[in-house]
Amino acid sequence: MKELAVKNKLGIAILMLPIWVALYLSLDWITRIIVYSFLSLPEDEHLTKAIYFFIFEVPKVLLLLTLIVFVVGIIRTYFSPEKTRAALEGKPLFVGNIMASSLGIVTPFCSCSAIPLFLGFVEAGIPLGVTFSFLIAAPMINEVAIVLLFGLFGWETALLYVSTGLIIAISAGWVIGKLKMERYVEDWVYKIKTDHTAVEEEHLTFGDRIDRGVEAIKDVVGKVWLYIMIGIAVGAGVHGFVPENFMASIMGKDVWWSVPLSVLIGIPMYSNAAGIIPIVQALIGKGASLGTALAFMMSVIGLSLPEMIILKKVLKIQLIAAFAGIVGIGIMIVGYIFNFIY
């Protein structure tokens, strides 16, 4: 009976794939019908460009997000914070930084889980620098960011973002580890003993994993769809009404101070990938350089002010400042490098 249920779920999933592909490939045609036939809007008007951008990009991003979140939701059933912690125990610093940064991509994470994960890692004896590699990579490199970058910029920029994000997470964690900053962790953290009772591992069928993928769609897309629409709406306004090359004088690669300024502006901002990436796309379209835009985006996502406020409960201000400074410098270096290359 279970095998039949699994086959049915797998069959439905496979059947939905060509429907998804057909919808995705038809978006431009559908958008043209809505904008030029149904709404009868004149071409080359600012408002028309903004509306076209919004109607085309929203379903495109949501379709991509739904597919990737479903796949990642299935993959994540093979991981858990407990398995991540176990995998990192006993690893030397640099190897641990690489593993922690890579595991951060596929391990479920949000700012609210930063303290429990941090406590579990420290109590398990995982080095502080390795722990920070995970805490940097997990929010910065996630499926939402990757999908939006792929959908709005293409696979080259998405790959670029993932690669540089991993380099920042690995190197920043390694530097923090080398600085021996354990004394700036609150004293009570090292005195606690978490429950090490083995958690019985769930035995999931592939049908259960498909269900988890569907649940992931409901959870992730349900949380970020509004941010996506707001971000794309702002991006549509910039796309339609801001003059060409307007941002070149502020965020262009010839303006040397644009990278550090964009990082400083981004740090206190509260947004996620869903809200900020469509805006960044529109800024680049109006003359902002890729390196400056990536630096701004990374600072908003990777140096989340709410996460730093939450971590203040377990870290002293010196360590939080070092964390923000090291990651911020790494982001600026990335920004300058890609402004030079592109």
Image: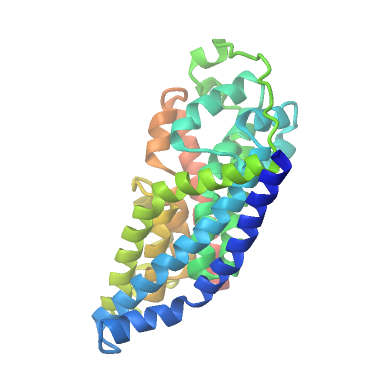
**Which residue is drawn at the image coordinates 58% and 42% (left, top)?**
212
Q: Is residue 41 above or below residue 246?
A: below
Against 324, residue 49 (above or below) is below
From this view, report whether residue 309 is shown above or below residue 263: above
The answer to whether residue 75 is left or right of residue 35 is right
Q: Residue 9: x and y, percent?
A: 63, 50
Q: Residue at x 44, y 24 (%)?
A: 316
Q: Residue furthest front?
A: 1
Query: Which quarter of the image is occupied by the N terminus?
Result: top right
Residue 127 rendering spot, x and y as whole percentages: 65, 27
The answer to which of 189 and 210 lies nearer the viewer is: 210
Circle count? 0
Q: Is residue 116 left or right of residue 198?
A: left
**Residue 244 visible in the current orientation:** no
Residue 265: image location, x then y, percent: 34, 53
In this view, the residue in front, 174 or 72, is 72
The colour scheme used to paint the residues is rainbow
In the rendered image, residue 320, in percent from the top left (x then y), is placed at: 45, 33
Quarter of the picture containing the C terminus is bottom right
The residue at the point 32 percent across, 71 percent down is 236
Residue situated in front as seen by the camera: 82 or 34: 34
Asked if one can make out residue 192 in the rendered structure from this viewpoint, the answer is yes
